Each structure stands twice: as structure tokens, then as C-alpha cells.
Image (cartoon, rainbow, N blue to C red):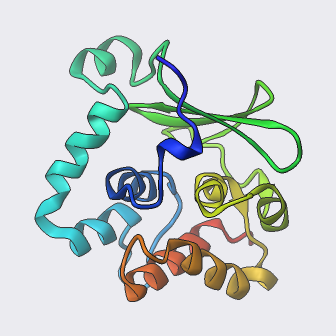
Amino acid sequence: MRPLTLDDIPLSDKNFWTNFIALSFPTALDKETDDSLSEILTDAIGEKVQSLTGWWDCFTKSSASVWEETDGYLPDPTTLVCPLATARTLKVEFHPGDIVYYVDGEQIGCTGPHYRIQVWSFADLTHAATDRRLFLLLLPLVAIGEQEANRAMGIIAQNLEGLFDRLLCERLARSIVYGLTED
């Protein structure tokens, strides 16, 4: 199967982006309600959750045997490959149990059970991300300094616009920044 490109995941693809946002931020939390992004989105979209979850399972090639035999990792996962603004190549593997990031063949992070995030600064993200899709894909890897938290919240909410209503974008952005802010 050929790798996906950014053109294969338009911002209008609610299935992809809703699942990606729900699953890619292991430390994100609404500090007022203690809800994870998955819980926030489940509350917001209600009964559509089941169809979205089924879509993601198909996208990541999830099955009971994958979990039993390989703990959620596939030898040939759904993969996205795209250039970064820094003349480097990003590869993102979507396994049933993890999203793994590589730059020029070197693993730089993952969002699964042994997550390795906060490996890039927010400034690095804004330089590397050439469009909103790339910004959102790389966002789980960012460490946000306390001094840039308010600015980051606004930029993140702006990049989520069109995917969800404005209030939900703001709540998601606030929760993401809470989870990615360095102490």
C-alpha cells in the first residue's frame, strides 16, 4: 500500500481528525473537569462515537489478533509521508496501539502507551509546519513553555477551527496546552 500524503487527509475529513485529536495527546486534560480529549469529544459528538471508533480501527488495521500477537503494532502500518519546511521528511505510522513519528528515518516520538512527546519546542513547530494539517499532526510532539501558553492556546484553537465549533476548539486547545506545558 502506498503511503498517504497530506492531500489524503484534508481538514474536511472529520473521521481522521476527530480520532487523531482524541487519541494523540496522552497528557491533555481539561483541568476543570478532569476529562481527557477522548472524553471531551465523546461528550461533544455523542452517538457518532461508535462509527468514528470503527473508522479508526479500519484505518489503523486494528483487530483482536493484532493486539494479541503484536501488542497493537503492525509490520506494515498505515503510513503518512510528507516533507517538512526544513527540507527533511516526516513519516507518521498509525498503528492500532500507537502513532509513531520519524524524521529522516529516525524515531522522534510516539503517542502510545510508552509515549514520548514534548520533543519539539512550539517555535520549532511553527517553523516546520507548512500548513494546518502538518501543524496538527506534529502538535502532540510539542513542549510549550509557560510563557507561551496563552499564545499557543490561540494558535491551536485557530488551527482546529472548521473541525469543531468554536467553543469546543477553545476547550480542546486549553486542554492540549495544559497537557503539553512544561513545568
Q: How many labels does the image show?
A: 0
Among all residues in the image, which is located at the extreme left? 47
Among all residues in the image, which is located at the extreme front? 7
Tell me residue 159's x, y (percent).
Answer: 57, 72
Q: Can the viewer see residue 84 in this picture?
A: yes
Q: Measured along the vertical axis of the image, is residue 46 above or below residue 173?
A: above
- Residue drawn at 65 percent across, 79 percent down: 155
In the visual, does 68 lie left or right of 134?
left
Could you say which quadrant of the image residue 100 lies in?
Answer: top right
- Residue drawn at 25 percent across, 14 percent down: 65
In the visual, does 43 lie left or right of 133?
left
Q: Measured along the vertical axis of the image, is residue 55 above or below residue 160?
A: above
Q: Measured along the vertical axis of the image, is residue 130 above or below residue 32?
A: above
Tell me residue 5's x, y (percent).
Answer: 58, 38
- Residue drawn at 64 percent across, 59 percent down: 139
Tell me residue 55's x, y (percent).
Answer: 25, 42
Tell me residue 16's x, y (percent).
Answer: 39, 50
- Residue drawn at 32 percent across, 21 percent down: 67
Could you say which quadrant of the image residue 7 lies in?
Answer: top right
Camera-side residue: 75 or 28? 75
Q: Can the viewer see residue 31 in this picture?
A: no
Camera-side residue: 182 or 4? 4
Camera-side residue: 32 or 38? 38
Could you say which quadrant of the image residue 35 lies in?
Answer: bottom left
Q: In which quarter of the image is the C terminus?
A: bottom right
